[in-house]
Amino acid sequence: MLVSATEMLNKAKAGHYAVGQFNINNLEWTKMILQAAQENNSPVILGVSEGAGKYMTGFKTVAAMVSAMIDEMKITVPVALHLDHGSYEGAKKCIAAGFSSVMFDGSHYGIEENIQKTREIIELAHSLGISVEAEVGAIGGEEDGVIGGGEVADPNECKMIADLGVDMLAAGIGNIHGVYPANWKGLNFEVLAAIQEKTGTMPLVLHGGTGIPDDMIKKAIDLGVSKINVNTECQLVFAEATRQYIEAGKDKQGKGFDPRKLLAPGAAAIKDKVTEKMILFGSVNKA
Ligand code: 13P
């Protein structure tokens, strides 16, 4: 069932668990994440970066594919289709294309402009029952061409954005997209606690989920994080399983070159990874 992310995240916040956002790149990714969600009876958020949207030929294709898959695969758990790190124009396009949720990432603007643009996106999205994620501070590293400086969020600015009526808020707390460097200092829990204090019941979002140790994930959930984004980890397990298949020469045995066979180990690896994260985040049987 395609729904906005609001209700599933409010339930997660009240129930002290988190819903995973898993980024999609193509049909295999989407199908495996939906299968994992259904089998684990877990709500799920499908994340689409602007780059991935373009790769899949446009947001309308993505929205049509996801809603058709939900129907054909008889998916009954709540699924949100969410724009990840959207620009102002990108958010508007996704709203028109049939997404059920959008992130408007105005973190690279000054706070006044971020507030102004976030307010406009909220007005438009909420009039159609679509949920909105905003960002304050910045997530370090690169997410599909969007580069963040890693500035830690100011809890007062988080409150200003929360007060606009945003449904979920991403705040930079030392998290980074992609693999963490060996000298990474970890998440800034003091800032997270201060943001939680200021923003109350509003669900907080932890980006850069790949490679954050399990104990830090659990502590972040305890401190009010109710949505956790994972992208790179699925890409890494997909690539590794595919490499093993090819290196073992399986593509040269019989019809092993058939794309449905060639892509199967990578797809299975994505499903296992998503299941592992749903268990860690506590969203199993929370549909
Ligand atoms: P990772 O690629 O580090 O898992 O981050 C995903 C993310 O935050 C998407 O917005």
Image (cartoon, rainbow, N blue to C red):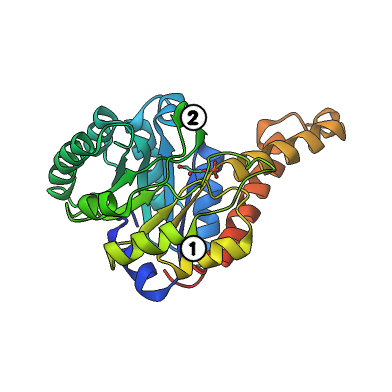
Q: Residues within 10 Å of mark 2 (few under 14, many from 20)?
A: some
Q: Give the side of residue 39 with respect to residue 162, left or right.
A: right
Spot occupied by residue 275 in the image (x, y as percentages of width and height):
59, 60
User: What's the distance in space between the residues labelled 1 and 2, CA to CA?
Assistant: 25 Å
Picture quadrant where residue 66 is located: top left
Q: Nearer the viewer, residue 1 or 128?
A: 128
> Where is residue 194 drawn, in percent x and y?
36, 62
Q: Position of residue 260 (x, y in %)?
A: 66, 36
Quadrant including the C terminus = bottom left
Residue 144's disc is 2
Left/right placement of residue 277 relative to residue 108 reads right
Q: Which residue occupies 43% across, 67% down?
A: 223
Residue 138: horizontal and vertical position, in percent? 41, 40
Q: Is mark 1 within 8 Å of ligand 1?
A: no
- Which tag, 1 or 2, sits closer to the chain's start? 2
Give the residue number, with chain letter if any, for mark 1.
220
Q: Is residue 57 above or below residue 262?
A: above
Residue 154, relative to residue 62: is it above or below?
A: below
Q: Of helix, strand and loop, which one carries label 2?
A: loop
On the image, which quarter does residue 88 sit in?
top left
How many other residues sit within 10 Å of disc 1, few (<14), some (14-19) or many (≥20)?
many
The numbered mark at residue 12 is none
Report the amino acid beneath label 1.
Ala
Which three-letter amino acid code belongs to the residue tagged 2?
Asp
Pick the front one: 32 or 169: 169
Instruction: Answer whether residue 14 is visible to the viewer in this image.
Output: yes
